[in-house]
Image (cartoon, rainbow, N blue to C red):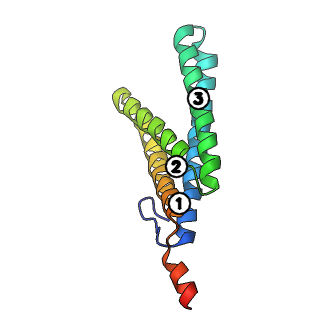
Amino acid sequence: MAMGNVDLTTRMGAHTATRTGSYAAFTFAVLGLLGALVYGFVIMKTNPELAKGATIGGLVEAVMGIIAGWRLRLGKGLFWGGATLFMVALELIGKVVAVQFGGLAIDSVVAIYLFNGLRGAYVLRQGRFAEDEAEVFG
C-alpha cells in the first residue's frame, strides 16, 4: 500500500488503513519515549528545567500514541488518533523551525499514515461499503 493510495471503498481496505495508522501511532509513542529518555538523561545536568518539560512532553506523546494505536487497531480511535495527529503536526512545525530534516521526514511519514488511519476509522464508523451490497444481491 502506497502512502497516499488507500482504498477505502472496501471494509478490508479501511481495516488496512486503521492498522497502518496504528503502527504510525505506536511509532510516534516510541519516538516520544526515546525523546523523553534522551532529555532526561543527557540534558538534565546542563538544563534541568528544559529537560523536565521535554521529558513530560515526551511521556505525554508516548501515552497518547499508545492509546491512539490501540484504538486504531480496533478500527476506532477518531478522537485519540486526531489528538495524536495534532501532536504530530506540532512536532512537524517544531522540526521545520529547528531545521531538523531527518526528524521532519520521519514525522511526515507518521503523519501521512496516521491521517490515512483516521480516514479508515471514519469510513468504518460510517459502515457503507460496496461489497456489502454485492453480498446481499450475490
- Contact between marks 2 and 1 (CB within 8 A): the answer is yes
Disc 1: which residue: 125
Q: CA distance from mark 2 to mark 1?
A: 9 Å
Dot label at residue 21: none
What whole-number distance in Å separates the C-alpha atoms at marks 2 and 3? 18 Å
Marks 2 and 3 close (CB-CB < 8 Å): no
Q: Quadrant of the C terminus?
A: bottom right
Q: Disc 1 residue type?
A: Arg
Q: Residues within 10 Å of mark 1 (few under 14, many from 20)?
A: few
- Is residue 8 visible to us here? yes
102 displayed left or right of 21: left
Q: Residue 109: percent from the left, percent from the top?
A: 46, 48
Q: CA distance from mark 1 to mark 3?
A: 27 Å
Q: Residues within 10 Å of mark 3 (few under 14, many from 20)?
A: some
Whole-percent x and y of residue 119? 46, 57
SS class, disc 1:
helix
Q: Amino acid at mark 3?
A: Val
Residue 132 lies, in percent from the top left, at 54, 79
Residue at 61% over, 34% down: 62
